[in-house]
Image: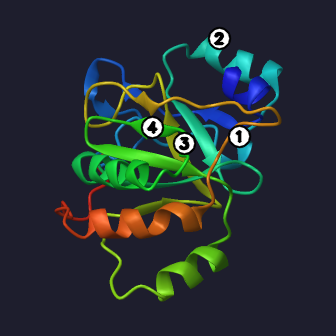
Amino acid sequence: MTCASAWNWPVLPGVGRASGDSSRCACPDPDCVVPGAHPFDPGLLAATTDPRMIGWWWARRPNAPVLLATGGAAPCAMSLPAEAAARALVRLDARGLRLGPVVATPTRWSLMVAPYSLERLGELLYAKDHVPSSLRFHGEGGYLLLPPSAASSGGRVRWERPPEEGPERLWLPEVEAVVDALVEAGSGAPDGGSRLAY
């Protein structure tokens, strides 16, 4: 409710884990790469800020993961393996950059940024010599797992840096402010294959 009402972030419940086998996703895919931590029913397009709908969803599934539908007017994010992201935060802090919220799972951290378009992101990345495959983007049509959800890799999702409200709205940096540090930090991170271990 805080995400939707106080911050105007569209949310929806994630699919969650299978009853009776908490290691498996509740979706029909036996090889799901993000167990429990993705939209299914309802789908991503159902994300809303309507407190009545949100109340109805979580009254029926109180342990459902909380998913933010990224992009549009909602925040976007960029994520790295946890160790690389921690290095990026040190670099960004040393530059005196004001950061926005940082969402952490045991395996990955996501730096939330102001909404960006895929075209804008593409232009930024095109100028780079190398973009590590360990760097992931959560923009238009994407989603981000939020606290206090269970992480698909085990453990819980938490705020490494909680949302900071300013006089007008929740603070989010522009993507240009963080992309260089994330690309640099991600270049030294193991890619971990193609599985999305969130």
Taking 140 as reference, is 112 left or right? left
Disc 2 crowd rating (10 Å Cα; few below 14, some 14-19, many 20+) is few
Element type at mark 2: helix
Q: Which residue is mark 2?
A: 59
| Marked residue nearer the N-terminal end (2 or 3) | 3
Taking 40 as reference, is 10 left or right? right
Q: Position of residue 117 (x, y in %)?
A: 68, 70
Q: Position of residue 95 (x, y in %)?
A: 44, 56
Residue 5, compared with residue 194, is above or below; it is: above
Circles 3, 1 touching at the beta carbon (< 8 Å): yes
| Marked residue nearer the N-terminal end (1 or 4) | 1
Instruction: Out of 140 and 110, give the one closest to the viewer.
Output: 110
| Marked residue nearer the N-terminal end (3 or 1) | 3
Residue 91 placement: quadrant: bottom left
Instruction: Out of 122 and 100, give the one closest to the viewer.
Output: 100
Disc 3 crowd rating (10 Å Cα; few below 14, some 14-19, many 20+) is many
| Marked residue nearer the N-terminal end (4 or 3) | 3
Distance from label 3 to label 1 (Cα)?
A: 10 Å
Residue 118 placement: quadrant: bottom right
Q: Which residue is mark 4?
A: 103
Q: Quadrant of the N terminus?
A: top right
Residue 134, compared with residue 88, is above or below; it is: below
The amino acid at mark 3 is Pro
Of tags 1 and 4, the one toward the viewer is 4
Q: Position of residue 156 (x, y in %)?
A: 35, 25
The amino acid at mark 1 is Ala
Element type at mark 1: loop
Distance from label 2 to label 1 (Cα)?
A: 16 Å
Q: Which residue is mark 1?
A: 47
Distance from label 2 to label 3 (Cα)?
A: 17 Å
Instruction: Please give the name of the residue rendered at 49% of the width and 28% of the height, measured from the top-left corner.
Output: 65
